[in-house]
Image (spheres, rainbow, N blue to C red):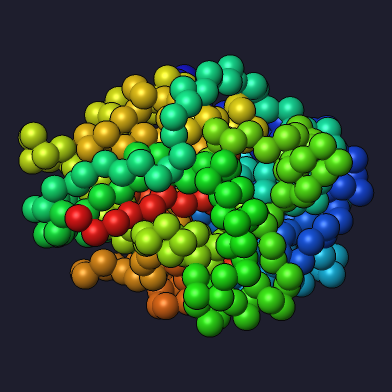
Amino acid sequence: MRSPSPVTDALAEARERTLAIVTGFGDADLESQHVEIMSPLVWDLAHIAAYEELWLVHRHGGRPLSRPDLAAMYDAFETPRAVRGDLPLLDRGQALEYLESVRERVADDGSFLHELVVRHEDQHQETMLQAIELARLRPAPAVPRARRPAAPGGHSGLEPVEVPAGPCVLGAAEGRFAYDNERPRHRAELPAFRIGRTPITNATFLHFVEGGGYERRTWWSDEAWAWKEEYDITHPEGWDRGPTGWRRWTLDGWAPIDPDEPAVHVSWFEAAALARAHEARLPTEAEWEKAATWDQATGEAREYPWGDEPPDERRANLDQGLLGPAPAGAYPAGAAPCGALGMLGDVWEWTASDFRGYDGFEAHPYREYSEVFFGDEYKVLRGGSWATRARVATPTFRNWDLPQRRQIFSGMRLAWDA
């Protein structure tokens, strides 16, 4: 008998983590749509099964769908989040049974599509964690916990490092898995710039809040100000001024705001306003990737900020084990060539860039993954968060969302012209 391929082992590990995330919740928690911008958790479970069946059983294996009647309901593009709570979704037991029955039909040969499906499930875990935190469900998900590193102190997000002018190589290299929007790999020539050594911390963002940052009209674009006024936005999502001071909601419940952690649940609008308050800006995604990967000494792009070794708990806060950000600068072994810290993990970092295809872009394996989102409506985020699986988090991975969105585990890193 042939032994399972590594990617098949990864499918099994991803499923174990998916089930751990939802194990502690009651049926009503899983089957309700708690907020309009997030799916019922049970939709995510059945969607994971439907996606796996479409790609690995039907298109790759050539076998018919077991539930063609479910295809449209669990198609993320055909069925937007706002309506998912009104659909006749599979209940918890049915969704779990669907997951199991699809997995039994998957052939074990470790193709590109197997890797696509693993990462799809990994990414939905992060989406589910967003929904759980936003809905304030309890208890905390039963994921394996990691040891929290000590706070090194001395980081605010306002300390810059220099990135010299010159060429760099951007995008995913051939010979490894990447999404279509990460290719083709290409050379770029960038002027010198400075970028934050760490993401902006809670202490820095709190100073912005208490210093009238949400009232200074000149720091906000017209669109951002209209959004802020319409929804009465006065601080990041999940913050609250409690009886003993500022606190924020976490997956472990209410906690005092840790001044050393990167600020999280911040929209692009808020990130851009804070940048203006500090006579700074958000980096372009080309600047961000050059800072994260370009080794000036060797003239080559590293696979990860620290080198070619995959992420581990010494280098980055990934894989969900802390259920939140670590203190800024807590992973010196993960430093990029320019000296920037924390460029993978902790919080997604907003960039100034609109989500567009690189020159020579070709959609693969389907247009709806990224091409239909290209344009000036979506902004690019880079770097992953504490909730991103290490398998997914690479410096070339491009996330995107609307500038008003705050449900994602997003923060920001500042940039300045040299």
The residue under the point 62% across, 80% down is 226
Residue 349 % position (x, y): 45, 51
- Looking at the picture, does residue 360 appear above or below residue 301? below
> In x, y percent, where is residue 84?
76, 66
Give the side of residue 282 with respect to residue 124, left or right.
left
Q: Residue at x 83, y 57 (%)?
A: 34
Residue 216 horizontal/vertical position (percent): 57, 70
Q: Quadrant of the C terminus?
A: bottom left
Residue 226 or 357: which is nearer the viewer?
226
Residue 352 at least partly seen: yes
Q: Nearer the viewer, residue 316 or 106?
A: 316
| Residue closer to the observer: 340 or 252 | 340
Direction from residue 51 to residue 177 in the image, left or right: left
Q: Can the viewer see residue 367 in this picture?
A: no
| Residue occupying the point 71% across, 78% down | 230
Whether residue 49 sits left or right of residue 392 in the image: it is right
| Residue at 57% in and 41% down | 203
Q: Is residue 186 above or below residue 93?
A: below
Q: Nearer the viewer, residue 236 or 358?
A: 236
Instruction: Please tell me how many numbered marks the rendered image carries.
Output: 0
Provide residue 300's location: percent of width, then percent of height: 12, 40
* Residue farthest along the front direction in this orientation: 211
